[in-house]
Each structure stands twice: as structure tokens, then as C-alpha cells.
Image (cartoon, helix red, strand yellow):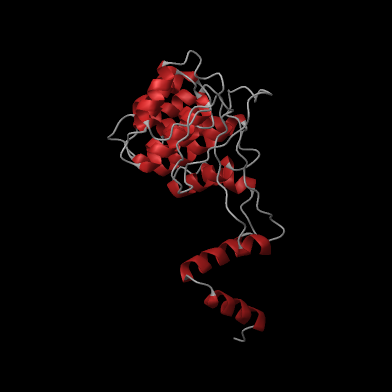
Amino acid sequence: MKIRPAWLAIAALLACLPGCDTASSDFASFTESFNPPTPSQAAQWALDMRDAENQRRGTLLLAGSDFGSESGYVRMYRLYIEENQDPLVRVAAIEALGRHGDADDAELIARQLKDKSVQVRVAAAKALQRIHNPKVTTALCSRLIDEGEESSVRIELAIALGQYPSDDAFQALAASLDARELGVNLAALDSLHLMTDQDFGLDRPLWLSWYASTRTPFSRRMQYLYPTYWREKGFWDHLIFWAPLRLEQPGVPVGMQEPEANIPRDPFGNVGDDKAPEAKGPTP
């Protein structure tokens, strides 16, 4: 068989790229972009009761689609969360419900914080960043201060609590400043900063002293925005010009009022930036 020069050039290009696995994966994504799954196929996969992997893939595709909020699909997400035996399918359903559910769904998602699968618990904590319902504050606080919980879960819980300027949330976040994991410390600090517009670094006694001496600790709170994934455009993103990369922007959780004119919008800053917070005095 005669090999076309164009394919030889592509093969040579892939050989020059670092990491064969990464190159192969990127090339697979490139070729699959010519023939992405149709909405009908995504729905068929999501409803495939014989194949959990198809259910997971289909549910994720629905979660990221514009039509994923159709009532029938939302009922499916809830059903999978409650009854599906595969933890990865439940993870996909929790992510989907976090994107397309309503404030009442927060209670169903919060119950998943006790699931034996850490992946399910992480997904639940992340989903609760997108849905606002004060009824779940107690569940968030109790899991955050549980030192036996995985740090990956506690980080997401600390982020989620930033939308609830209340005494129990403040106390749980302040306690988390003394956690062994720096990621938990920084996530808690960010939420405390959002709630109060103050920054006492990781000094828990100073936070508690200020809180005890202040009658209105949350009067200067900033608008909570759920965090989203962001990255620079890569080589294939520029090459696949017919399917431009669209990254979701941080937003106001479902069930929370839109930002007031006098409340600044300030997404999280410390989480994941590898920088230690700079301790500052109280804002005058």
C-alpha cells in the first residue's frame, strides 16, 4: 500500500512531539472532532442499561450540552444519583445535576457527601458550589471539619461554603485554617475573604478575635461565583478552527440572587495558584 506524503508528514509531526501517549490522545481528539457524537447518540448511550461506560459517557455529553436541562434528562440524573450502582455513573449524574438542577436538588446532592466513593464525594462538593440552598450548610460544615475526610473533598467543601455568610460556615472555615493540608487552608481563607472582605492570613486566633468584636461581620461580603476550569489554548485548539474552544466563565449559583450593584464580583484567588497568602490587617 502506498502511503500518502500528507500522512507521513503528520506521523513525523507526532513523532517529534513530547510524550507519545499525549500526542496519540490529541490526535484521536483531532480525528474524532470530524464526527462527534450526535445528540441522539449521546442520549442512547446515557440510557444504555447494559453498559455503565456508555451511561457515563452519554451523561457527561448531556451535562455539557445546551439541551441537557430538558426535564426528562434532569429526572434521569436524579434517578442515577439515587439508584445507579456504578460510582462513575453517579459522578457524571451529580455533575450534570449540578449544572442543570435547581435549588431543591442541593439536598439530594448533599446526601452524596457520605458516599463511600471519594470520587462521588468530590463531585458532590463541586456540584454544591453551583447550587445555593442554605439547608445544606450543616452538611457542608460537618464534612469540612471532619479530619478523616480526604483533603480533595474538603477543599471543594471550603469553596462551596463561601456562598453562605453565616456563623456556622465562618466557624467551620476558621477551624480549617489549622488543617494539616495547605490546600484546605487556602480554600478556607478564600471563602473567609469573600464573606468578610478581610484578610488575616492563616492566623485563626486573629480571625476569631476580629469576628467576636464585630457586630456585622458580613456587611462587606463580596459576590460568590462558582469556580470553573480554565487553560490556555493548545496546538490542537488552534488547528480545529471549526470547533472553537469555549471555556465556561465563573457564575452565580442557581438559587442565589444576582450580584447587587455594591457587591464586587471576586472569584477565588488563592486556590491552586501555589502562592502563600499575604497576611494583612483589617480593612478600615
Which residue is farthest bottom? 2
Instruction: Name the spot of residue 86 as percent of width and height, x first.
Output: 39, 42
User: Which residue appears at 62% of the width and 80% of the height?
Assistant: 9
Residue 162's place in the image compared with 17, above or below, is: above
Which residue is farthest right? 242
Q: Is residue 213 visible?
A: yes
Give the position of the C terminus as an image quadrant: top right
* 107 with respect to 179 (left or right): right
Question: Residue 29 versus residue 217: which sits nearer the camera?
Answer: 217
Instruction: Name the spot of residue 26 as percent of width and height, x first.
Output: 55, 64
Give the position of the N terminus as an image quadrant: bottom right
User: Which residue appears at 57% of the width and 52% of the height?
Assistant: 231
Instruction: Name the spot of residue 169 as percent of width and height, x first.
Output: 42, 23
User: Which residue appears at 44% of the width and 40% of the height?
Assistant: 91
Question: Residue 154 versus residue 38: which sits nearer the camera?
Answer: 154
Which residue is farthest top? 215
